Image: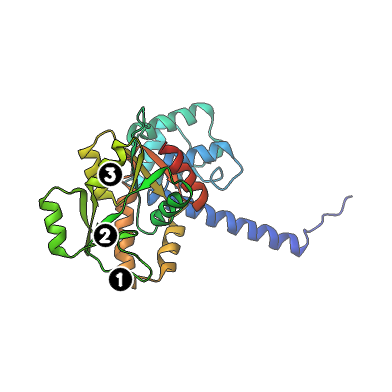
Amino acid sequence: MAESRTPPEVDRVAASRRAVAARRERAALKKDVSMRVITPQELLRRALAEPASPAGAMRVTEFLTSIPAIGEGKRDRILKDLEISPVKRLGGLGSRQRTQLRRFLDGRWPEIEPRGGRSRLVVLAGPTAVGKGTVAAHIKEHHPEIHLSVSATTRAPRPGEVDGEHYFFVDDAEFDRMVEAGELLEHATVHNAYRYGTPRAPIERVLADGRTALLEIDLQGARQVRTADPSATLVFLLPPSWDELVHRLVGRGTEGAEERTRRLRTAKTELASQGEFDYRVVNDDVVRAADEVARLAR
């Protein structure tokens, strides 16, 4: 009779660590959906592409309750309507169940398809601390054919910033004059503090020369540009995950705890607006993200 063998302690420890890591990754994915960093459809795509991955191992009950506005009661009604067992994992859904779940998601949270054609006026926006400035700076250095707009602002220069190169630094009276004279393509008060705006004349000259202009601005400004020029191409920069966005904001060390909390609340609201944009680019690597934005701007 064969003797049963107990797995060596090292194997049990390794298996336990893998299980903990998988649980943490599933928790991070659920948070990304709840904070709108990724769409429910994107998480479902990952699960179906790799059924053995943490996304694929996620129970459909966990998946649904990670979606904003779906509680346990609504979750159970959805599962009943879709005829999906609550013990099912995303990676183990049958073909009919996959189709039903996709249709449900697309009906409630439709993903925006890019509009046909591209404009030479390109707007790059995204939540706080996502790295818009870093990506824009890389484009300026490595893609000289793309003109990076210089904004006007009422805040004081930071160490190393040069007037006319990084920003046009103006006082409130001059900013008011620019607004009254119609010299700004868009303008907004950012984080309830300073005002920022895009001077119109340099952008018009660039476009008249047949070149591409890139505006790195906030969500309010992006909406104003879309109103002023509906053909403008809007690109939304996303973080790789919500946890990474928090890490970047804390790592900057430029805001206190109260201000960080306020900015993260704002970021959640901004992430919910990504569907208004034509394209979404994940800033998981500055060079890769900058090159992707540059391709969209051609």
Q: CA distance from mark 2 to mark 3?
A: 14 Å
- Between marks 1 and 3 in the image, the one whose residue lies nearer the viewer: 3
Rendering quarter of residue 169: bottom left
Q: Secondary structure at mark 3?
A: helix
Question: Could you classify mark 1 by the number of other residues whose Cα lies within 10 Å: few (under 14), some (14-19), or many (20 or more)?
Answer: few
Rendering quarter of residue 131: bottom left
Residue at image mark 1:
258
Q: Where, quadrant-wise, is the C terminus in this rendering? A: top left
- Place of residue 250 in the rendered image (x, y in percent of width and height, measured from the top left): 41, 67
- Judge whether residue 18 can be spotted in this image: yes
Mark before the other along the chain sequence, 1 or 3: 3
- Place of residue 246 in the rendered image (x, y in percent of width and height, measured from the top left): 42, 62
Q: Secondary structure at mark 2?
A: strand
Question: Could you classify mark 3 by the number of other residues whose Cα lies within 10 Å: few (under 14), some (14-19), or many (20 or more)?
Answer: many
The foreground one among 36 and 127 is 127
Q: Residue furthest bottom?
A: 256
Q: Amino acid at mark 3?
A: Ile
Rendering quarter of residue 19: bottom right
The foreground one among 186 and 38 is 186
Q: Amino acid at mark 1?
A: Glu
Q: CA distance from mark 2 to mark 1?
A: 29 Å
Residue at image mark 3:
203
Q: Secondary structure at mark 1?
A: helix
Mark before the other along the chain sequence, 2 or 3: 2
- Place of residue 127 in the rendered image (x, y in percent of width and height, measured from the top left): 35, 54
- Horizontal placement of 286 versus 255: left or right? right
Residue at image mark 2:
168
Q: Residue at x 49, y 31 (%)?
A: 98
Q: Amino acid at mark 2?
A: Phe
- Horizontal placement of 94 versus 226: left or right? right
Q: Residue at x 46, y 34 (%)?
A: 84
Q: How many marks?
A: 3
